[in-house]
């Protein structure tokens, strides 16, 4: 429990550049590593396994002392590429894997054989204890300040609760936009932090300038929770279009979700539709866009290179 994130990943600062769907890329992670932190990319950002393999090789060649890199895996049935992605990661090697939305059991088994650490997203103690029992190296505690899919508990309450009841390190995810936020999370007992939204407005991010500029112009008070993307509560910027379409699931989705036999399929369909909509929003600037972000964009005042954002966070 006393091990810090800096020791786990051999990095200079206890910070992970969080994996963000369609936003994260190798350029961002390379610059993050140069800044002395860890960088992570969703494996789903690559359409083919060959593209994923090429990205791993690029990061291995660019790795510098004081930095590290990893990938995020969606480990439930909604990700039909999961097994192939895990195989490639274990074959090529990386420093760590972050698992989300499912049981990490198989990932932990295979990754540990390949010498890769596994950190698991959790939102409460119940799942934290499960992944600890399965052999996870650390917990990613997703709190109610996180961007995208978030938890329901405040950073302070969640971190302290997990630290008091788990024997593996707790990494806080959500609510970090400046150095004072990092210090606060560490004071609660976190071994480190995972930071996403501030990096959306980076020069290297794979999104439109309109998306980046929205993270500059909007703040914490402009973040709302919507059920319209994946069926699971997700934080987005409250643009005029979001206000127009509303943030609640449709009455048809509510009705279908009450049917136990159909609920799983409804969620899978909604997830697929939501991911396609998010992709369009990230890569095409139109009126009908839904931009995912967390309240930590409050501290984003301009579009900056990734390395400059790292410096702002740690100095």
Image (cartoon, grey):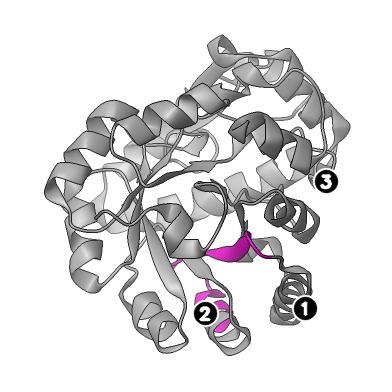
Count of numbered circles on the image: 3
Q: Can you identify the residue that label 2 sits on? A: 86
State the separation of the CA atoms marked 2 and 3: 26 Å
Q: Residue furthest left?
A: 165
State the separation of the CA atoms marked 3 and 1: 18 Å
Q: Earlier in the sequence, mark 3 or mark 1?
A: 1
Give the secondary structure at mark 2.
helix
Give the quarter of the figure containing the C terminus.
top right
Q: Nearer the viewer, mark 2 or mark 3?
A: 3
In the picture, measured across the screen, residue 302 lies left or right of residue 138, that is right
State the separation of the CA atoms marked 2 and 1: 15 Å
Report crowding for label 1: few under 14, some 14 to 19, many 20 or more residues within 10 A (C-alpha): few
Report crowding for label 2: few under 14, some 14 to 19, many 20 or more residues within 10 A (C-alpha): many
Cβ–Cβ below 8 Å for labels 2 and 3? no
Check if residue 68 falls in the magenta segment. Answer: yes
In the picture, measured across the screen, residue 199 lies left or right of residue 176, that is right
Q: Can you identify the residue that label 3 sits on? A: 204
Report crowding for label 3: few under 14, some 14 to 19, many 20 or more residues within 10 A (C-alpha): many
The residue under the point 71% across, 68% down is 63
Residue 264 percent location from the top left of the image: 35, 57
Check if residue 27 falls in the magenta segment. Answer: no
Give the quarter of the figure containing the N terminus.
bottom left
What range is drawn magenta here? 65-85
Residue toward you, 61 or 161? 61
Residue 145 percent location from the top left of the image: 43, 27
As drawn, 280 above or below 184: below
Residue toward you, 20 or 248? 20
Q: Can you identify the residue that label 1 sits on? A: 54
Q: Is residue 200 visible?
A: no
């Amino acid at each position: 429990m006393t091990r810090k994130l800096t020791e786990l990943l051999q990095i200079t600062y206890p910070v992970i550049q969080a994996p963000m769907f369609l936003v994260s890329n190798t350029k961002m992670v390379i610059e993050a590593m140069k800044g002395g932190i860890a960088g992570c990319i969703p494996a789903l950002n690559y359409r083919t396994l060959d593209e994923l393999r090429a990205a791993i090789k690029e990061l291995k060649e660019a790795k510098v002392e004081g930095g590290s890199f990893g990938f995020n895996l969606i480990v439930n049935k909604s990700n039909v590429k999961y097994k192939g992605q895990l195989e490639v990661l274990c074959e090529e090697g990386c420093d760590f894997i972050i698992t989300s939305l499912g049981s990490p059991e198989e990932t932990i088994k295979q990754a540990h054989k390949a010498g890769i650490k596994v950190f698991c997203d959790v939102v409460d103690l119940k799942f934290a204890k499960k992944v600890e029992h399965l052999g996870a190296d650390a917990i990613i505690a997703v709190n109610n300040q996180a961007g995208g899919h978030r938890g329901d508990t405040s950073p302070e309450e969640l971190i302290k609760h997990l630290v008091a009841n788990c024997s593996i390190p707790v990494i806080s995810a959500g609510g970090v936009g400046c150095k004072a936020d990092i210090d606060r999370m560490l004071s609660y007992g976190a071994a480190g932090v995972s930071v996403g939204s501030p990096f959306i407005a980076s020069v290297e991010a794979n999104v439109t300038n309109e998306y980046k500029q929205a993270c500059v112009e909007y703040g914490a008070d402009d973040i709302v929770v919507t059920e319209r993307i994946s069926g699971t509560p997700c934080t987005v910027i409250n643009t005029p279009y979001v206000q127009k379409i509303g943030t609640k699931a449709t009455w048809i989705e509510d009705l279908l979700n009450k049917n136990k036999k159909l609920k799983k399929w409804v969620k899978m369909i909604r997830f697929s539709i939501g991911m396609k909509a998010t992709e369009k929003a990230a890569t095409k600037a139109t009126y009908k866009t839904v931009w995912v972000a967390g309240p930590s964009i409050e501290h984003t005042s301009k579009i900056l290179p990734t390395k400059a954002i790292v410096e702002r966070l740690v100095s």
